Every structure is written in structure tokens, then in C-alpha cells.
Image (cartoon, rainbow, N blue to C red):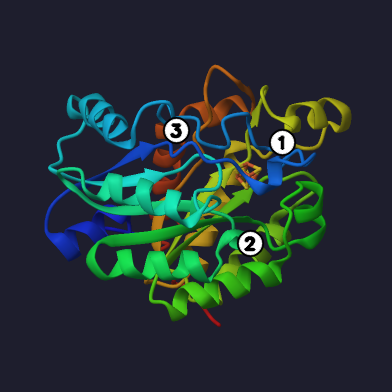
Amino acid sequence: MNRYYTLSDYFKEKYGYKILKLSVNGGFTCPNRINGLKGCLFCSDLGSGEFGEDSSLSIREQIVRQKNFLKHKNKANKYIAYFQSFTNTFDKIENLENKYYEALNCDTIIGLAIATRPDCIDDKVIDLLKEINEKYELWVELGFQTSNAKTANLIRRGYDNSVFIDAVGRLNSAGIKVVSHLIFGLPNENVEDWVNSVDFISKMNLWGVKFHSLYIQKNSDLYKYYLENNFKIISKDEYTDMVCRAISLIPKNYVVHRLTGDADKTQLYLPKWSADKLSVIGLIQKKLKIKNIVQGINYNY
Ligand code: SF4
């Protein structure tokens, strides 16, 4: 029994076959990391794209490499190009257009996933995405992380919740699907904050959600912050309980893209349990079964 709606469920329903994501690196930067800004507290020097490709290669070359890399592990004939590292709508519109279409013009690429910030979606970007959305699969991922304004400030997210609401509204009006990222375990947050964040995104018209456990990488400012402040690290039990609860609270039609974070193991400091992704996912699935939770069972807005 499927207890939550996965991305492969969505692909199977819509296309009838398996589709995989290929991570590409457009060589963009982030407005939160330039002009003296130090970026989100947890962001690594790779712009939260730990498994991205080498941006000195063309998009086409990156796609070929990623396909070769995946072909022994997973069999698929069609792919989504995932612009993951940094802020993938933060550039001149011509550059964005060139990079997006370079990916879309590659054989077997059926669409794009674009990770960005809600304060980097102007009308030109919306128009370009709208045009792409008419012919290809497309979604935009926004790193919301938390609805708690104090935490958002602490982690240097760099925008208010109202900016997120506004961006989602404009993307919705253009018919573009939106995925939001949430992190459970941010400094000084507790279950109440996590549930509030889930409530917040559940009231919006999103298409999907990605759940992450907070992890500390040594190549992030969060590492220094932890050494100085020693905040409580979320346990595996707390995290898996929370994801089960979140699944029960979100709307049935939200696509659950991710159940846990994916740290670069060579840089991971804490929590060590987060390195074993399969065990975390396995525990969530076990708990969903024991608690008899299915997605949206407690959705009530
Ligand atoms: S928005 Fe993304 S790339 Fe920019 S600082 Fe935050 S996590 Fe890093």
C-alpha cells in the first residue's frame, strides 16, 4: 500500500514510464551569497548542490555524464534536468533561456526542475518559465525551510514569508508547479515550529514538498555556529516521527519528492544517523505502517 504520493507515482500516472532526474549545474550564483552576504547558515560552498555536476562543462556534457553515471544503477529512458546548485533563476534572462533550452534540446530530456529563491522570480522569469511549461514538464523548487520568522532570520534566509507567498501566487497564476523545501531540526526549533511550518505550506497551493533533516556540514557556517552554540540536534526518532506527522497533515495531492536530506558524507559532522538515508526512509515507512498513517489523513484546513 502506498502511504504517500511519490514523484514516481506522479510520473507513472502522467507518462506511464520511469523518469529520473539528472543534476546539472548552470554555474549560477546566489543573491544571498554576494555583496558581503554570507548565505543561508547551512549552505555549503557548493550552494546546496552537493551532487551537482562541474559547471565548467556545458549543460549537454553534464547531461551525458549524469546519464552514464546513472545507467548502471537505475534504468530510465527519459529524464528531467534538475538545476539544483545555487539560485537557478538569478542571471540575465538570455543566459537562463540558453541554459534551460540547452538542457531541453538534449535527447531524452522531457523537462526541468529549477531550484531557486522566491525573491528571484520576476516577470521575465515567469514569462520564460510559462513558455517552457507549455511544452515541457516543469516545476520550480523554493527553499522555504521554516515559517518561523525568528528562525528564518537566524539562518539568514534573507526573505520574509510574504515574499514566499507572493512568489507561489504568481507561479500558480502562470500555471507553474511549485515544490517547497522544509527542514526539521533547525536551531532552537521544536515540534511545534515544525508542525507550524507544515501547516503553513499545507494552506498554500503547492504541487510538492521536500522534507529534510538538518545536517551540519563542516564546509558550512552552521558548523561554526554549532561549535559556538551547541544547539540540540534532532534525533533519528524525532525526525522520522515528524515526517510521519507531516505526511498525515499535508494535502493528499502534494507530491512528496523527498523524505530526508542528503549530506555530502565527506563533510558531514552531525547527525551521523542522517548519513544512512535508506535506514531513515525505511524507518519512516515502518512508522507510517505501525501508526496507520496515509497522506492527508489529518489534513484539515
Ligand atoms: S538560497 Fe540556496 S544557494 Fe543561496 S545561500 Fe541559501 S541555500 Fe545557499
Q: Is residue 57 above or below residue 113?
A: above
Q: Is residue 34 left or right of residue 253?
A: right
For mark 2, give the secondary structure. helix
Q: Amino acid at mark 3?
A: Lys
Q: Picture quarter containing residue 7?
A: bottom left
Q: Earlier in the sequence, mark 1 or mark 2?
A: 2
Category of crowding for the residue at label 3, using alpha-carbon neighbours closer than 10 angstroms: few (below 14), some (14–19), many (at least 20): some
At a point 52% along the width and 68% down the height, the residue shown is: 249
Q: Amino acid at mark 2?
A: Asp
Where does the image place residue 189, in percent across and percent down from the top left? 76, 51
Say whether marks 3 and 2 touch (CB < 8 Å): no
Q: Earlier in the sequence, mark 3 or mark 1?
A: 1
> Ligand 1 lies in which image quarter?
top right
Q: Nearer the viewer, residue 289 or 88?
A: 88
Where does the image place residue 122, in percent across and percent down from the top left? 56, 67
Q: Amino acid at mark 1?
A: Ile
Distance from disc 3 to disc 1, alpha carbons, whole Å, reads 17 Å
Write down the residue under mark 3.
277
Where does the image place residue 235, in percent across and percent down from the top left? 64, 37
Task: Determine if residue 254 is in view.
Answer: no
Quarter that holds the N terminus: bottom left
At a point 57% along the width and 68% down the height, the residue shown is: 201
Distance from disc 3 to disc 2, alpha carbons, whole Å, reads 31 Å
